[in-house]
Each structure stands twice: as structure tokens, then as C-alpha cells.
Amino acid sequence: MTSSVSADFQGKHVTVAGLGVSGIPAAKVLHARGALVTVVNDGDDARAREQAAELEALGITVRLGDGATLPEGTDLIVTAPGWKPDKPLFEAARAAGVEIWGDVELAWRLRGPDAAPWLAITGTNGKTTTTQMLAAILKAAGLRTAAVGNIGISVLDAVLGEERYDVLAVELSSYQLHWAPSLRAHSAAVLNLAPDHLDWHGSMEAYARDKGRIYEGNRVACVYNVADKATEDLVREADVEEGCRAIGFTLGSPGPSQLGVVDGILVDRAFVENRQKNAQELAEVSDVNPPAPHNIANALAAAALARAFGVPAKAVRDGLRAFTPDAHRIAHVADVDGVAYVDDSKATNTHAAEASLAAYESIVWIAGGLAKGASFDELVAKSAKRLRGVVLIGADRALIREALARHAPEVPVVDLDRTDTGAMLQAVTEAKRLAQPGDTVLLAPACASMDMFTNYNKRGDAFAEAVRELGS
């Protein structure tokens, strides 16, 4: 759409659902375009009142403590991505025929006529890393780009800011995709699919359906994971533009229209002349940091999207070499007495923990936290042969303990019944007692952190601090 879309909001009654990182910018943007904005928010605490005062000073109406009632005359709702679809506000909106957009949908609608195309990424795990890898590759090709969406700057800021981009690397969550019905990417990837956020989506089918929205209307490439058939199924179901191709990535040797690995080399058999016979070398496995299997898969997905945009092979290698992963993602903290200590606090679900555990041969595993309705039987069964011992922490540790009793009864388990600030130091101390030289003590909790820590970053920091104390 052209920038003249701003006129569409003149005099419209728009309800913004939720204060916070997406709600406040959306309210300001809509108000600046002449909309009559009412912000509704469930909470009414000191922080919310402070945010409300900031918006009210601009002339925006804010209603605290009532996020359930549809304001009279509402023409459109713009919601924070985390608001669940079954909230009474949305049920009332649907009954009244009122459209519901997320902040990503708003950004997409506000794009100017010369807007940068989007290369979009989703999946249960690896989204942030892959998006940042993609941005690094695009920059290595000399393109003006940024990693945006669920990370970095918001999509709204990227679309409406002063800086002009050639292309955007966009990370999208299942929540954001649910509320973005008209989004149409240049190319997109679904990295993997595993049960997550089912309390929000209601079922695995609904979760997968929302992830699959990322492929709708793709112009050049739908990138899928050869090892995860569900991602390829989403490509088959998508309504794409004529000529759009399905491109697979695999840790094995690639077939035509795939990227994969041959003798330690990342190779492309999708974006080459005569792909039936030819392959293009892109980078070495050693160029990927860290070169764990799931991270090599992330690199291949990023490379596929970059190649779909026409990026040369050299830029893939240079971008991967330049890329530095965020903290708490399979990060080596220290070696103490011949034992490696690795922080993967970002492994907040079973699928992520499984990938992390698969990267090491002999592990003392620190796990536990808030399970978010997850089951641990499959994870434990697949990883049992790698486990030297397990230290359990957090509110839902009993679920993991029971899975260990069923599938790895011979593995020694330490169950820590404490949630104070010293719990992580004790966990690391117990892990050290279980570990032998050559082992890896791995924090890959398979659970959310909020029972004991503010977020996964704080949990990882506590682990690293405990390891340093151990080493000293």
C-alpha cells in the first residue's frame, strides 16, 4: 500500500489492546494519523498509570483495569501480540464485525510504495539466531538491512523511521502471525514445529496453522526443514504467488532445490544453474558459531533466504563469520577441572533442550522451571544415553523427575527443593560432583524461568556467576 494509507485512519475509532512495547507505539502512530484512539489495559498498577499519563498528555484516551469491554463505536482493534484470541474483547469485536490487527499487521499496512521487502522467519526454536544470521549475511552483501520484529527494533519503527532499508530480516512469533492476516513476505522460513504456547493457541493444529501464515503470498521461496515434515506440509498448504519455490534445508547431503552439508561444507543446490548436477559452496561448518547441529540448521535456513534474495555465496560465508550469537544460547562459560560448563538458558521448551542436548556426548543436565503444560517423556527418552546425571530445579521439576524414572532410571538425579537466590549455586555445585573430566554441565532447562528468575537472561547470568564462583 502507499503512504497515503495514513488518511484511512482519519476520524476512525481505533481501540489499542494493551500498553507496553507494542501498544504504546501503535497508539502514538495511529493518533498521529488522525485516529481517535482508546487504549484498554487489564492492569492498573503504578507502571500502567505512568504509561497512561504519557499517552493522555497527547490526547489519547486510556482505560485501565478493563481490557474486556469493547469501547463504543470501535472501528478497528490493534492488539499487543500476547493477548489471547479468546479474550472477551475480541469475542465482542468479532460479534460486531470489527477487524483485529496486531502491530505487525499495522506496520505492513503502513508501508510506503517503495518499502523494503521482508524476509520472514518463524519456528518454535532458533528464530532470533537465524534472523540475526540472515541480517549479518545481508550486510556482508552490502545491503542496508536490520533484524526486526520479535527482536531488535519493532517492525513499526523500521517501517516508519527515517532510515531506508533495501530488505528487512523479520522474526515473527506465532502470536504476531495470528494477528497479521494480510502479511505477504518476499520469502519466508519455518525452522521447526514442536508443541509450544498451546495454552494460547488452544491446540497444536492451531499453533501450526498460525506459523504457516508466514508462507501466504510468498513471491520467491518458502524455506522448510527437510527433517521436520510438518514444515514442508505447511508449504504445501500455502497459497503462494505463481513461480514461488519450495526450498529445503538439511544437515545431510542436499537434493535439488535444497541446501545442505557435504564433507563439512555448507552447499546450495537450489539457487544455482542446473541444480540437478551442480552445487555451490557457501561456507564451512567451522564458519558457524557455535557449530552445534541445530545452529548449522539455522545457518542453512538463513543462507536459503539470503540466496532467495540474490545474495552471492561469498556474502553467506562472510556474514556467518561475522555473526556473534546472543548470550544464553549454547554459550561456553568456562572449563573447570576438565569439565565444560555451557549456558543454554534460552532453551525454554523441550524442543530447544533436545537440540541442545544433542550437541554433546556426555552431559550433566541442569533442568526445570515452569513447564507450560509440556510433557518430558520424548525428550528424556531421546537424550537418556547422553546423561551422566541430572540436577533438577524449579516449580515443575517433578514432571522431569517422573520422565527420568520412566526412561532413564539408571541416571542419578539430584532434586533441589529450593527457589531462593542460592539455588543455582547449589545446582552447579551438585552438577560438579556428578561430572567427570570430558563431560559437559549443560543448563538447558526445557522450561520457562519465571518461577525463580525474572527471565531466562537472569537465569543464565546466575548459572555463569555460579560457575565462576566454582572456578575461583
Image (spheres, helix red, strand yellow):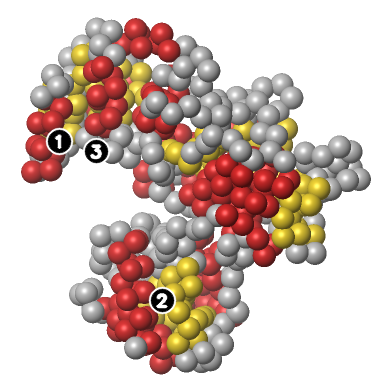
Percent position (x, y) of residue 149?
43, 38
Would residue 363 be found to the left or right of residue 304 on screen?
Answer: left
Task: Give me the residue at 64% from left, 40% from top.
Answer: 141
Q: Which amino acid type corresponds to the residue marked 3 in the rendered image?
A: Gly
Task: Give me the residue at 36% from left, 74% from top.
Answer: 464
From the image, tell me which residue sits under label 1: 51
Q: What is the CA distance from the residue labelled 3 to the residue labelled 2?
A: 33 Å
The quarter holding residue 156 reads top left
> Considering only order in the chain, which callout, 3 or 1, is on the residue closer to the N terminus?
3
Tell me the quarter of the image containing the C terminus: bottom left
- Label pair 2/1, CB-CB below 8 angstroms: no
Q: Nearer the viewer, residue 472 or 141?
A: 141
Q: Is residue 408 at least partly visible in the picture?
A: no
Mark 3 neighbour class, 10 Å CA radius: few under 14, some 14 to 19, many 20 or more: some
Which of pointers 2 and 1 indicates the residue nearer the eye?
A: 1
The quarter holding residue 104 reads top left
64 to 324, vertically: above or below = above
> Considering only order in the chain, which callout, 2 or 3, is on the residue closer to the N terminus?
3
Residue 20, disc: 3
Label 2 secondary element = strand
Q: What is the CA distance from the residue labelled 1 to the residue labelled 3?
A: 8 Å
Mark 1 neighbour class, 10 Å CA radius: few under 14, some 14 to 19, many 20 or more: some
